[in-house]
């Protein structure tokens, strides 16, 4: 078992800000929610809490910020059924049915309000408006890129042999689950392995799949049935009662990019750009949907049209990324204003309280 695993559970996508925390945090019973504005030390506290638990050999799941992947939105200690999260990052906490106790920690109380001048407050308000605009511009650009991607897919969908795609799905259902006895149906846990960030696409595929014995790399063009195959396999696993982690696409959360079956020590994932990897060890194999399902010659027959689509798509994705970079810069300025007014001795006191809570939970088992 890996001591530290890394995920995202929110994303800046073609469909706007998208949250998967209600599913990612399923099974938790207690949640500590860090409230307050950016710049008050929440991510630093999360990191210290996580590192402390890892140093004591507790398995910890790290949930990263899509705006700054080096920072944390939240952490989970699964066997303690406890989580700690930045309240600004998680969406609707009421949608996590297993949680019995939510304990807020008010980081806003660490702010010395008299150190924020009228000018600071006016600037923060103006920055907040510009920040929202930058995010909205990014979402609009991603959405336009998605529509261009739909054009790209259309060429291949027209050449798709859907009967062969159905055969592949049945083959893999049998390969993965055929020898397993039926168990009560389960609900898969939904996550992101990557995110669109101000520096481009970022993912944790390698670290998430490294401990697994079997990895299936799905290759193929846009529209060759990769996500549809994953959806069919996820549904089959849930019906069969097989534990499954379902990873949504960080660009279009309506699509799937990876499944992990922990009890089978197996992952199957879309291994095309921007998360293209290749087999490099025993237990790795390739499933090429283009070769298996497409009429040959599509790339050559429509080379000019496809090149134009790829150029337009890349330009729009680059524009969306630039808007995220603008959002990060604006957010950094807001953080700096709050940081300058924060009494970090009070933040340290909040950290100690949380450490005591987690230590007590570890001693009692939850």
Image (tube, rainbow, N blue to C red):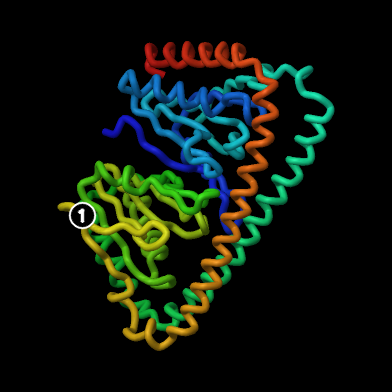
Residue farthest to the left? 282
Q: Image quarter for residue 348?
A: top right
Work out whether residue 235 can be spotted. no
Q: Nearer the viewer, residue 110 or 83?
A: 110
Image position of 8 (left or right of 55): right
Residue farthest to the right? 118
Work out whether residue 222 can be spotted. yes
Q: Nearer the viewer, residue 90 or 100?
A: 90
* Position above or below: 352 against 216: above
Question: Could you tell me which secondary element the residue under label 1 belongs to?
Answer: loop
Q: Nearer the viewer, residue 363 or 347?
A: 347
Question: Crowdedness of circle 1 by 10 Å Cα count: few (<14), some, many (20+)?
Answer: few
Quadrant including the N terminus: top left
| Residue at 64% across, 20% down | 106
Q: Position of residue 289 (x, y in %)?
A: 32, 71
Q: Position of residue 131 (x, y in %)?
A: 70, 45
Q: Position of residue 332 (x, y in %)?
A: 63, 37
* Residue topped by disc 1: 280
* Position above or below: 283 against 337: below
* Position above or below: 299 against 236: below
Q: Image quarter for residue 102?
A: top right
| Residue at 45% across, 21% down | 49
Quadrant including the C terminus: top left
Q: Position of residue 100 (x, y in %)?
A: 53, 25
């Amino acid at each position: 078992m890996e001591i530290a695993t890394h995920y995202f559970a929110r994303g800046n996508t073609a469909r706007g800000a998208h949250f998967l925390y209600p599913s990612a945090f399923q099974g938790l019973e207690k949640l500590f929610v860090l409230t307050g504005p950016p710049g008050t030390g929440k991510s630093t506290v999360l990191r210290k809490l996580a590192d402390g638990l890892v140093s004591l050999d507790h398995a910890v799941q790290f949930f990263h910020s899509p705006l700054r992947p080096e920072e944390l939105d939240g952490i989970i200690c699964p066997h303690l059924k406890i989580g700690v999260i930045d309240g600004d990052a998680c969406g609707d906490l009421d949608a996590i049915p297993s949680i019995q106790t939510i304990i807020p920690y008010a980081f806003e109380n660490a702010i010395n309000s008299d150190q924020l001048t009228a000018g600071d407050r006016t600037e923060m308000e103006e920055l907040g408006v510009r920040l929202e605009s930058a995010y909205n511009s990014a979402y609009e650009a991603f959405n336009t890129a998605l529509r261009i991607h739909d054009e790209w897919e259309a060429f291949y969908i027209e050449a798709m042999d859907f009967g062969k795609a159905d055969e592949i799905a049945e083959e893999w259902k049998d390969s993965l689950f055929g020898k397993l006895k039926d168990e009560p149906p389960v609900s898969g846990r939904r996550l992101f392995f990557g995110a669109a960030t101000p520096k481009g696409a970022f993912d944790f595929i390698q670290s998430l799949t490294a401990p697994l014995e079997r990895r299936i790399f799905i290759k193929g063009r846009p529209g060759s049935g990769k996500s549809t195959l994953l959806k069919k396999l996820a549904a089959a696993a849930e019906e069969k009662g097989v534990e499954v982690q379902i990873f949504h696409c960080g660009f279009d959360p309506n699509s799937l990019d990876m499944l992990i079956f922990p009890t089978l020590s197996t992952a199957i994932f879309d291994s095309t750009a921007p998360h293209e990897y290749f087999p490099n060890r025993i237990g790795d194999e390739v499933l090429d949907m283009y070769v298996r399902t497409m009429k040959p010659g599509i790339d050559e027959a429509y080379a000019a049209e496809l090149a134009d689509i790829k150029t337009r798509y890349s330009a729009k994705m680059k524009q969306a990324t630039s808007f995220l970079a603008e959002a990060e810069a604006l957010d950094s300025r807001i953080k700096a204003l709050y940081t300058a007014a924060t009494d970090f001795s009070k933040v340290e006191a909040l950290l100690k309280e949380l450490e005591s809570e987690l230590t007590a939970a570890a001693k009692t088992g939850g």
